[in-house]
Image (cartoon, grey):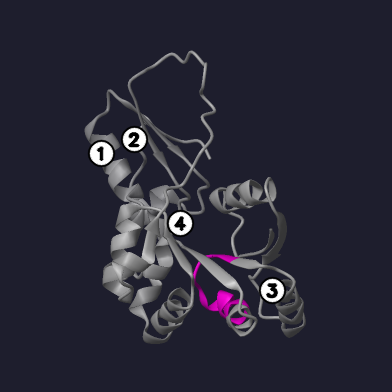
Amino acid sequence: MRIFFGQNSDASFVQRDLKILESQHQVLSRNLRHFNPCRWIGDVFGVLGSQVVVLWFASLRSLPVLLAAVAFGKKIVTVVGGYEAANMPKLDYGQARFTIKRAVTRLILLSSDLILAVSRSSLDEIHQNLGIPRDRITLLYHGFEDIAAGANFHKEQLIVNIGNVNKVTWLKKGIKDFIEVAELMPAVRFVHVGAVKLDLEKQLGRKLPPNLEFIG
């Protein structure tokens, strides 16, 4: 099958899905993270030559490809990330907070033949915040290789948190909470995995606890 794979992220879970599709199908992958009319023309021709269009993220940047897919009568599969369906004003997070962006996301999803949510909470937000009927949404969890199969790891008392650290994730991903819990449990080792793009001690207003490591 010929698949047009449109995405605007280098995230590992997006690239993993791309590799899965490439193992079974003929895939044209295009990064939609641009506002270049010349590249849009290339995207349109890519859609024309495909049988199915897969969109990873229902964002404004996916709209030109969606319109081309609808015009050419292509089947459309859209995977929804967390941001598109979120509405969290207190965290200044979520595309569903904005009238126009919410309308664009709804248009993309209502035009899709298959809508994929990667978690039950995401499915709930797509329904509640975007008004998409539950029977239009399919739950399909992220899949990850069992890289630890057959390994014999030594277990220790260790608390791990994972995710990139920036001004948005500081509250949204619970980075601040993770640090504060580490302060309350000085005898336990805490490790955070993920890129750090923030001056943590400046953001926290004090030194980090000695039992906490940010290992990148």
The magenta-colored residue range is: 54-66
Q: CA distance from mark 4 to mark 2?
A: 19 Å
Q: Nearer the viewer, mark 2 or mark 3?
A: 3
Residue 27, by quadrant, is bottom right
Residue 23 part of the magenta segment: no
**Which of the marked residues, 4 or 2, is nearer the chain's N terminus?**
4
Specify the quadrant that holds the N terminus: bottom right
SS label for mark 2:
loop
Residue 2 numbered mark, or none: none
Q: Position of residue 153 (x, y in %)?
A: 46, 15
Q: CA distance from mark 3 to mark 1?
A: 49 Å
Q: Is residue 101 above or below residue 17?
A: below
**Residue type indicated by callout 3:** Val
x 49%, y 42%: residue:
143
* Mark 3, other Cα within 10 Å: few <14 / some 14–19 / many ≥20: many
Mark 2 = which residue? 209
Q: CA distance from mark 3 to mark 4?
A: 35 Å
Q: Nearer the viewer, mark 2 or mark 1?
A: 1
**Residue type indicated by callout 2:** Pro
**19 sits to left or right of 138:** right
**Residue type indicated by callout 1:** Val
Q: Nearer the viewer, mark 3 or mark 1?
A: 3
SS label for mark 3:
helix
Residue 47 numbered mark, or none: 3
Mark 4 = which residue? 166
Residue 38, by quadrant, is bottom right
Q: Position of residue 69 (x, y in %)?
A: 61, 78
Give the mark count: 4
**Which of the marked residues, 3 or 1, is nearer the chain's N terminus?**
3
Residue 88: in sight, yes or no?
A: no
* Mark 2, other Cα within 10 Å: few <14 / some 14–19 / many ≥20: some
**Which of the marked residues, 3 or 4, is nearer the chain's N terminus?**
3
